[in-house]
Image: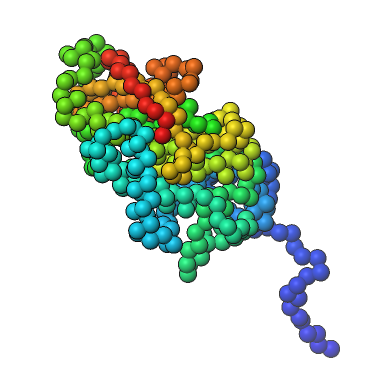
Amino acid sequence: MSYLLRSDPVSRIHPEPQSLTSFDHFDLLPDSLLLLIFDKVADVKDLGRCCIVSRRFHSLVPFVENVLVRVDCVISDDDSSSSDENHRFSLNTASISDAGGAGGSFSALFRLVFAPIFKPFQMLGQILGPKRSSSSFDASFSAINDEIGVTHHSPTQVLKNFGEIRFLKIELPTGELGIEDGILLKWRADFGSTLDNCMILGASSVIQSNSVKNHENSVDEDNGNIPESFYTNGGLKLRVVWTISSLIAASARHYLLQPIINEHKSLDRLVLSDADGQGVLCMNREQLEELRVTPLSASSASKRTLVPALNMRLWYAPELDLPDGTVLKGATLVAIRPSESKKEVCDASWLSDAFEEPFGTAAKMLIKRRTYCLEMNSF
């Protein structure tokens, strides 16, 4: 009698235990740890990629508390013709000139300087403002791996399905102010329902030097006084333009954040910056609540928050040598608070912490010089 030997069946009734090499160790991680990892990731595009990894990741991402939105591009309004844009620009510049009470030549200077910045403000509304059509959480991230085309979503759309955001940072691709190469202009503004404070640091040029200097015992040869040439060669007029343009940029950003602030009640802090490091708008929890309770006052001429009457303090140095060797020519620091504010404009604590190094050191050095007071009407 012969026997036919058969091989084992491909499938077993009782399969062998799964090997450790094929086991998904992520399943052993608790949700709290995964959320901590997602908080460190923060970038909304990377979180979108995490969503397509697994159903579990997809269900956890909406509960992330720290979110960073980097805006890739600014989309212009195709429905507006160039003549319409010029018309809107004329209205805006006229309102600024009238508010400042300036003469004809000063008004022409405003038109020349502000021309490059109003169109970016209009396009800023396109990327931050909500669109009419709503999209689900899946649709918001569907374009990330789309190799055929790119679907654009505003930050308002992308963030609508995040329900637990506590810290939100939005980064624009560039600053709104079209300044010439070599000029330094940085600003930081805090807002509630209106402007709370603003700091502006500017310089006509920045020179990098290899020599490191000690300024602990240095004495200003000019005793901190502004030279007479500052008033006659257009230096003061240029600083006024820097100040107004920075305030317009800050108030435009604040105006466009309102729908995001109203929708996300869990926010503790919101920052709107740009990749150029030109300007930063900040709001803490108290200021966010203030905006929800007290609606902002919008400017009648453009889509931005109305800037109240202001008290300003100005410090100037023809040349400022920083400890790291950086030299600022025509260094200027402007501190701004509303006229109705009870807080001191010259409070050194918030002035020195407004800018990253080495510009924080520059601010500390400038406030030791002579202080000049200015006032500005609401606009």
**Where in the figure is residue 46, as x and y percent of width and height?**
52, 51
Vertical position of residue 343 compared to residue 304: above or below? above
The quadrant of the image that shows the N terminus is bottom right
Q: Please say whether residue 326 is visible from this viewpoint.
A: no
Is 303 on the left-hand or right-hand side of 326?
A: right
Is 170 on the left-hand or right-hand side of 62?
A: left
Identify the image quadrant of residue 273.
top left
Q: Residue furthest bottom?
A: 1
Q: Who is closer to the viewer here, 165 or 265?
A: 265
**Where in the figure is residue 126, as x and y percent of width and height?**
47, 53
Kindly identify the residue that appears in the image at 81 percent across and 88 percent down: 2
**Where in the figure is residue 181, as x and y percent of width and height?**
23, 42
Identify the image quadrant of residue 302.
top left
Identify the image quadrant of residue 66.
top right
The quadrant of the image that shows the C terminus is top left
Kindly identify the residue that appears in the image at 19 percent across and 31 percent down: 234
**Where in the figure is residue 62, as x and y percent of width and height?**
64, 48
Is 376 on the left-hand or right-hand side of 112?
A: right
Vertical position of residue 340 compared to residue 14: above or below? above
Vertical position of residue 146 compared to residue 60: above or below? below
Q: Who is closer to the viewer here, 56 or 116?
A: 116
